[in-house]
């Protein structure tokens, strides 16, 4: 990943900010959108960068870090897989929403000891899973807090 094929723009140090830098509250229509004046302040203090990442690399970042998807100006297809992992002790209430026809596959892997992960899932019909995957929220529309 390089600048010309759309490496993610990151804003170093922004993981130290709190929600006051955003236009909207958790789950609101503007949640995750940074206030323009705060963008300008951060750009002056420490401008964003686009990293050069070798193929096959793994990037680990704090979810609070400001980041921006950038355009791919090349003619090559760019693939990026994104995953969120929580420590086993962290009681997060979020669940993946997966089509129920995938359930036997995951259960078989788990039973055979090949999954190696706890996968909290809400099983739904394929049509609902497909429709929902195309209309997911971004940023703060998810609740990363611990359940009590």
Image (cartoon, grey):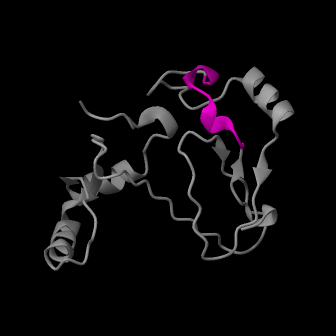
Q: Residue at x 45, y 40 (%)?
A: 137
Q: Quadrant of residue 53?
A: bottom right
Q: Residue at x 73, y 60 (%)?
A: 6
Residue 91 in the image: state x and y as whole percent: 27, 41
Instruction: Describe residue 142's horizontal placement relative to residue 20 as left or right.
Output: left
User: Relative to 124, does residue 144 appear above or below in the rendering?
Assistant: above
Q: Is residue 68 magenta?
A: no
Magenta region: which residues?
11-22
User: Relative to 62, does residue 146 appear above or below in the rendering?
Assistant: above
Q: Quadrant of residue 144?
A: top left
Q: Residue at x 56, y 32 (%)?
A: 32
Instruction: Describe residue 54's horizontal placement relative to residue 62 as left or right.
Output: right
Instruction: Describe residue 5's horizontal placement relative to residue 98 as left or right.
Output: right
Residue 112 in the image: state x and y as whole percent: 16, 80
Q: Residue at x 41, y 37 (%)?
A: 142
Q: Is residue 17 magenta?
A: yes
Location of the C terminus by quadrant is top left
Instruction: Describe residue 47's horizontal placement relative to residue 101 as left or right.
Output: right
């Amino acid at each position: 990943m390089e600048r010309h094929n759309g490496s993610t723009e990151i804003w170093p140090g922004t993981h130290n900010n709190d929600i006051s830098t955003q236009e909207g509250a958790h789950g609101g229509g503007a949640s995750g959108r940074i206030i323009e004046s705060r963008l300008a302040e951060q750009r002056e203090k420490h401008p964003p960068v686009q990293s050069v990442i070798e193929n096959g690399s793994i990037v680990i970042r704090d979810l609070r870090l400001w980041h921006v998807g950038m355009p791919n100006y090349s003619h090559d297809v760019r693939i990026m897989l994104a995953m969120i992992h929580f420590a086993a002790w962290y009681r997060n209430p979020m669940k993946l929403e997966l089509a129920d026809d995938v359930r036997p596959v995951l259960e078989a892997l788990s039973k055979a000891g090949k999954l190696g992960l706890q996968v909290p899932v809400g099983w739904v019909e394929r049509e609902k899973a497909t429709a929902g995957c195309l209309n997911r929220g971004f940023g703060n529309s998810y609740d990363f807090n611990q359940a009590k």
